[in-house]
Image (cartoon, rainbow, N blue to C red):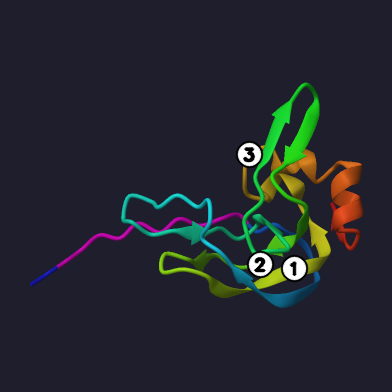
Amino acid sequence: MYAKTVNYDNTPEFLAAEHHVCFSTTINNTGITADSNGKKWAIAGSLIDATGNVVTVTYSASTYTPSATPVGILFHTVDVTEGSQPASLMVEGYVMAERLQGDNVAGYVATAAFKTACPEIKLR
């Protein structure tokens, strides 16, 4: 008999209300590092830019700097190990900033730059 232990990671629910609007998009695996099993995951709650890449945010000298301008939030985790994959992109709704994925993202989404880029995504 063969038995294998598989560990599953979950991300916290980032929605603050039931109302949300998502559109279909394509997520790229550019800049995503493979995990210990060789899988590349785009994690739900990550900021996504217009080309389908995950946006990273750096913080220096009291300034948040995104790698690109986000257009929405990835709604479900997507396996991009084999390349680009279809996904849901949230463009409208209420979110809890501290539950979004990525370093410095919670601070960035509170800035005027994010509110200009994604005016229909509101913080709770």
- Kindly identify which residue carries mark 3: 103
Q: Are marks 3 and 1 in contact (CB under 8 Å)?
A: no
Which residue range is magenta in the image?
A: 3-12
Q: In terms of secondary structure, where does tag 1 sit?
A: strand
Residue drawn at the location 62% of the way across and 45% of the way down: 102
SS majority, magenta: loop
Tell me the CA gap for discs 2 and 1.
6 Å
Tag 1: residue type?
A: Met
Count of residue discs = 3
Crowding at dot 3, Cα within 10 Å, few <14 / some 14-19 / many 20+, comes out as: few
Residue drawn at the location 52% of the way across and 70% of the way down: 84
Q: Do the residues labelled 2 and 1 touch (CB within 8 Å)?
A: yes
- Kindly identify which residue carries mark 1: 90
Q: Residue 75 carries which label?
A: 2
Residue drawn at the location 73% of the way across and 50% of the way down: 68
Q: In terms of secondary structure, where does tag 2 sit?
A: loop
Note whether 61 is above or below 78 in the view shown: above
Q: Which of marks 2 and 1 is nearer the N terminus?
A: 2
Tag 2: residue type?
A: Phe
Note whether 76 is above or below 30 in the view shown: below
Q: Nearer the viewer, residue 43 or 97?
A: 43
Q: In terms of secondary structure, where does tag 3 sit?
A: loop
Outermost left residue? 1
Q: Is residue 83 left or right of residue 100?
A: left
Q: Earlier in the sequence, mark 3 or mark 1?
A: 1
Residue drawn at the location 61% of the way across and 54% of the way down: 12
Residue 121 magenta-highlighted: no
Tell me the CA gap for discs 2 and 3.
18 Å
Residue 67 picture location, percent across and down: 69, 45
Q: Is residue 60 left or right of residue 87?
A: right
